[in-house]
Amino acid sequence: MGQLNTTRNVARADDVYQMLIDAHEGKTKDESDAFNARLILTLINHIGDEAVIAEALSVAEG
Amino acid sequence: MFDDRYTLAYKLYPYEKSADQDLDTPVRHPVVVVGGGPIGVATALDLGQQGIPVLVLDDHEGVGMGSRAICFSKRCLEVADRYGCGTPMVEKGVTWNLGKVFHRDHKVFEFNLLPEDGHKYPAFINLQQPYFESFMIERLRALQAEGAPIQLRGKNRVDAIEVKDDHVVLTVMTPDGPYTVEADWLVAADGANSPLRDKLGLGFTGKVFKDSFLIADIRMKGDVDFPTERWFWFEPSHGEGASMLLHRQPDNVWRVDFQIGWDVDRKEEMKEENIRRRLDAFLKGVEYDMVWSSIYTFQCKRMESFRHGRVFFAGDAAHQVSPFGARGANSGIQDVDNLGWKLGLVISGKAPEALLDSYSAEREHGADENILNSTRSTDFITPKSETSKIFRDAVLALSDKHDFARPFVNSGRLSVPCYYDGLPLNGADDLPGGPARARPGAPCPDVPLGDGFLIERLGARKGAAFQILAVDAEVPETFSAHGLDLEVVKVSAADAPLLRERYLGEARSAVYLIRPDQHVAARWETWDDRAVAQALGRATGHDIGKEQ
């Protein structure tokens, strides 16, 4: 399948960004890193499609 | 006895002894405003235009030095237009719509704040605060000359306040000694450190941010090629500081704002050689004069309630935000815009006192919105934790190539007008297919009409009048209800096509009930006497405190 969505897809970007930052509030750096790993794996499962995940990895590579 | 807390840019209202000072019985004024800054003077213009006597007391004799607030929003200018001083502000100000965001030394993206035409006023102008205030005081003098019942007293400092059930008693210090004055209603517009708030023992709660910012206003010598745009740098590599803002003002003056951290030696940083060191690293060889500089820290705080019986708090006295987003003076002017007509109606016996509670409800909503936005911007600009900074930098890195990440970049969400959604004065939204931007609670969108603009015909300019805006609708020539005579404004989409997009939407005709502050109270597709009368009752506070 493939085709990572790289168009704007979040209606209220500021709200969502705040949810993300708030989720880290009070965590140590190690706890935050572990949290991020769990978050990424959860989102990867939601996406499912290997080709899309590969595209996302390449976007993150920069 | 009278030490000025700041230097004056213009001495505009020197102390004069008033007749009140020699009387044995204190004079009772309908409205006393404490504070002669932009918010206090705007209150005087609003009430004075309505013919409501208003007395402004200020502990100084004019307008303070320093550019301070520089960005004035479209909504603020529309309010100023109603007060009769919007045009000179725009003529003097620098108009801008475009912002650019940089990370280190490259541009991440740019944004346009007013992506559509057909508005009398631009998204923003930059104007030094002393000019903004001077234009309002000039207007105040013109209104006085026309007989408006406004008094402005310099070097009149409120030293004590006593709040009674139905009035307020003030002890006012002057160079000739103290006197007592009474007010039916008091508006406290005495700034972020509001002495009145302290005297009444009222709280001011929220967040203090641990960062300091150094502002330098500089006048460039010779030709400079910086355009009239807002430039914001995250981690600038060419200058010093964790972030930096560059913005043009009138008179070839530029505002440069450096984020310099929390633990700084203020005295050291304020030395001209140190300010120049930071500027030179960025300006490389450009010649300039220093105009004004200051170091500030900020907080995002508000009072729990903006009304305390006979006392109203407005502007920075009621709420304070970070400067990112230009939400300070602009929201203060919206406070005045909201309070003025309500006080006017209550004082002239045309609305119940309960209407005044809606000032609190609506403007606390506005303050919350401003505090939320300004807190978020601050958190993005100055991330509080390592992880927060990692995310911030990731957003900036992705934004360079990918448009999807750009909505997350937050260098300040610039002031937009407040929509009073879901609040008690709003009436029916009975216009199927009507545009959301003109829903009840919304400020009226502007539309060009022949050789003028709709915004010039809406809102109270003399009395606190409600209006009917009829867009291709059959409406009566006049209408009265609840003791108010409404003005009818008839327009047609045939003459002004943008009315379709901004007021009709899918509908063929529309009837809008417009508040004196140019906000929509209710709307329908066609005229209905009873429905309009009911909405007018609601918008003037007749339903507040009653079972719905």
Image: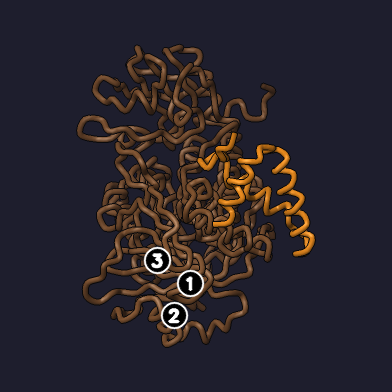
Chain colours: A orange, B brown
Q: Callout 1 environment at 10 Å: few (<14), some (14 to 19), or many (20+)? A: many
Instruction: List the residue tagged with mark 1.
Output: B258
Instruction: Tell me which numbered mark, 1 or 2, is placed earlier along the sequence.
Output: 1
Look at the image and tell me whether residue B199 can be seen: no
Instruction: Tell me which numbered mark, 3 or 2, is placed earlier along the sequence.
Output: 3
- Spatial CA distance of label 3 from label 1 is 9 Å
Instruction: List the residue tagged with mark 3.
Output: B246
The quadrant holding residue B196 is bottom right
Chain holding disc 3: B
In the rendered image, residues at marks 1 and 2 fall on the same chain: yes
**For residue B278, which numbered disc appears in the image?**
2
Q: Secondary structure at mark 1?
A: strand
Look at the image and tell me whether residue B438 can be seen: yes
Q: Is residue B129 above or below residue B349?
A: below
Q: Are marks 1 and 2 in contact (CB under 8 Å)?
A: yes
Q: Secondary structure at mark 2?
A: helix
Q: Is residue B241 above or below residue A32?
A: below
